[in-house]
Image (cartoon, helix red, strand yellow):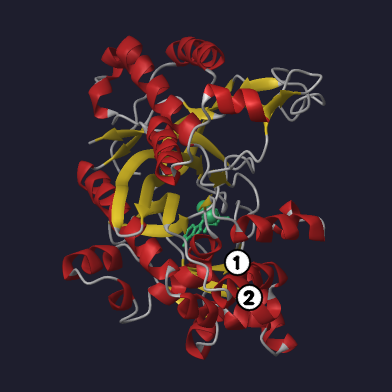
Amino acid sequence: MSAAAPPSPGPEAVGEMVQEATAWCALHGLVVGDRADPRSGTVPGVGLVHAPFSLFPTHLPESCWRQACELAPIFNELVDRVSLDGDFLQDSLSKTKQVDDFTSRLLEIHRKMMEINKEENIRLGLHRSDYMLDSETNSLLQIELNTISASFPGLGSLVSELHRTLIDRYGNLFCLDSKRVPENAATSRFAEALARAWDEFNVDRKTLSEVEAEGHLLPDGTLVVDGRTVSVVYFRAGYTPNDYPSETEWTARLLMEQSSAVKCPSISYHLVGTKKIQQELAKPNVLERFLENKEEIAKIRKCFAGLWSLDDEEIVKSAIQNPELFVLKPQREGGGNNIYGLDVRETLIRLQKEGGDALAAYILMQRIFPKASLANLVRGGVCHEALTISELGIYGAYLRNKGKVVMNEQSGYLMRTKVSSSDEGGVAAGFAVLDSLYLT
Ligand code: ADP
Ligand code: MG
Ligand code: MG
């Protein structure tokens, strides 16, 4: 992320480190499903390969690191406040709804909850706010805020550990100190937040005699205690239209939303994480509706990149003129959905011709240009040196029970590094590798 010169080990040292690192991955579970193996994902423990990773952590100025960490609890609180303003969510997304069926279905569930005055006393957020360091202004700018299925807390923690191990072993060669790779407790912090949500829910635990009276065993040995209460629903899916192939999935989503279980995320938290809301919050005087503390507002605003709704004709015009300065984003998650470069121009012209509200499905964002640096990317046991850029994600855990904030903290981090010529950044989507950071 920074201009600091990357370490430049010779090919022999790299070869040895790659062997050491990939073996470490296998031993410590830094692995993912191997798409090349047809049985992967169907037979547990079969068809695994080390997760793609960067051999060295990416350099990052300590001041940026601190800034990003400080923002985590403020964004957590902001999400919570915005989630309580149902009208704001409905109004902000009203045009998007006309042209985006997926967002419309989510809003429909949200509207039903508003109609029955559904209150969520216990609110759990496991978020990840992503940033890039803009090379022109040297400022840390937010890419997006993920409020559903924020990925890789587990693997991210492991990559930090891998880098510390490698530096302890080889770092002397490159004058590196493993203490400069910050601790990354994302796994345990998120696990703690989930456990504490369960705790707040406070389901009476069954006594032995109740289990004896109410429980029974299925032929395969499963113990079923009647009316078993679910306390926490964690969504690891449900953030793309593909996760809802039929009405059944939407019915299930509605059912869970109607329940008293703690949802991570609730429909409101989910909607707060849309790109449209990110853009609405960046408008003048909108943050002030949700936060009182002027310093916190200033800190948040400082990390906002340029964001525009497409009913701003001037900005659409300049995006058509200089498409390379913008990213065009639909209301989607998971990587691979954004539009870049000349496609921005083409899409805007086409949408303008289509007329109506077609443009409302998208937002425009200032394109951020991080400084590129050389990195060693390891994929499938093979190491490539490439010019790369990085994206820092900071996890945040938030748990609230009515008036009481039980947890609100920065909960570890994730660095993702990709070849600088690639527009998109998803690891699962195959664009980026997992990384950690080295404070400079
Ligand atoms: P998603 O929810 O699909 O992850 P993002 O907004 O994070 O959507 O965009 C996906 C990727 O596109 C990011 O990880 C980043 O690599 C790239 N990207 C997004 N916005 C910008 C931007 N404003 N400038 C430069 N790259 C961007
Ligand atoms: Mg996202
Ligand atoms: Mg993203």
Q: Is residue 439 among what the camera can see? A: yes
Label 2: few (<14), some (14–19) or many (≥20) C-alpha neighbours in 10 Å? many
Residues tagged 2 and 1 counted as in contact (Cβ below 8 A): yes
Count of picture labels = 2
Image quadrant assignment for residue 83: bottom left
- The amino acid marked with disc number 2 is Ala
N-term mark: 2 or 1:
1
Percent position of residue 68, x then y: 29, 50
Please tell me whether mark 2 sits on a helix, a strand or a loop.
helix
The residue carrying mark 1 is 331
Which residue does the image show at 24% across and 24% down from the upper left?
Answer: 179
The quarter of the picture where the N terminus appears is top left
81 relative to 146, above or below: below
Image quadrant assignment for residue 347: bottom right
133 relative to 21, above or below: below
Distance from label 2 to label 1 (Cα)?
7 Å
Which residue does the image show at 72% across and 21% down from the upper left?
Answer: 44
> In the rendering, which numbered label is found on residue 440?
none
Tell whether circle 1 marks a residue whose Cβ is less than 8 angstroms from ligand 1: no
Q: Is residue 134 left or right of residue 362?
A: left
Please tell me whether mark 1 sits on a helix, a strand or a loop.
loop
Nearer to the camera, 175 or 221:
221
- The amino acid marked with disc number 1 is Gln
Percent position of residue 110, x then y: 58, 70
138 relative to 377, above or below: below
Nearer to the camera, 440 or 383:
440
Percent position of residue 239, x then y: 63, 55
Nearer to the camera, 171 or 92:
92
The residue carrying mark 2 is 361
Label 1: few (<14), some (14–19) or many (≥20) C-alpha neighbours in 10 Å? many
The quarter of the picture where the C terminus appears is top left
